[in-house]
Amino acid sequence: MICEKCQEVTVLGLSHMCAPAWLVWCTDLGLEEGDADTVYAHRPERAAERWAEDYDRRNADYAIVRGSDVEVLVRPRIGVHGEPLRMLVTGETVPVYSAVEVRS
Ligand SMILES: [Zn+2]
């Protein structure tokens, strides 16, 4: 099963607690805190990475993974005030090889 809130895979019958919620927004795209997406992650770095994965998927041109680094701001959704954390997000593509037997 997948948790509807945080999108983590959960095991039926085991209790599940969502990771902390972060607000993530990309200043390089001209976004402000009011445009922030909520991302669930155990670390702010992972929140920035998940945001980038979602952004690339939503926009279908995979700009970040193709080399356009972006800066995003991350802050806990509840509790902490003060300056958000600045994260530089980079992406890379990983070559994938596969083999099948050639039958003649
Ligand atoms: Zn959850």
Image: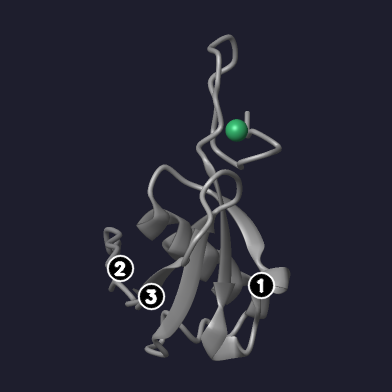
Q: Secondary structure at mark 1?
A: helix
Which residue lies under the disc numbered 3?
Answer: 89
Please rate how many residues cluster around mark 3, counting C-alpha atoms within 10 Å: few if below 14, some from 14 to 19, many from 20.
some
Please rate how many residues cluster around mark 1, counting C-alpha atoms within 10 Å: few if below 14, some from 14 to 19, many from 20.
few
Q: Nearer the viewer, mark 2 or mark 3?
A: 3
Label 1 to label 3, Cα distance in Å? 16 Å
Residue 96 is tagged as 2
State the residue at coordinates (71%, 37%).
4
Residue 28 is tagged as none
State the residue at coordinates (46%, 67%).
83
- Sequence-wise, which precedes: disc 1 or disc 3? 1
Which residue lies under the disc numbered 1?
Answer: 58
Q: Nearer the viewer, mark 1 or mark 3?
A: 3
Where residue 43 appears, x then y in whole percent? Answer: 38, 48
- Sequence-wise, which precedes: disc 2 or disc 3? 3
Taking depth in this image into account, of 33 and 47 the one nearest to the observer is 33
| Pointer 1 with pointer 3, Cβ within 8 A | no
- Sequence-wise, which precedes: disc 1 or disc 2? 1
The quadrant the C terminus occupies is bottom left
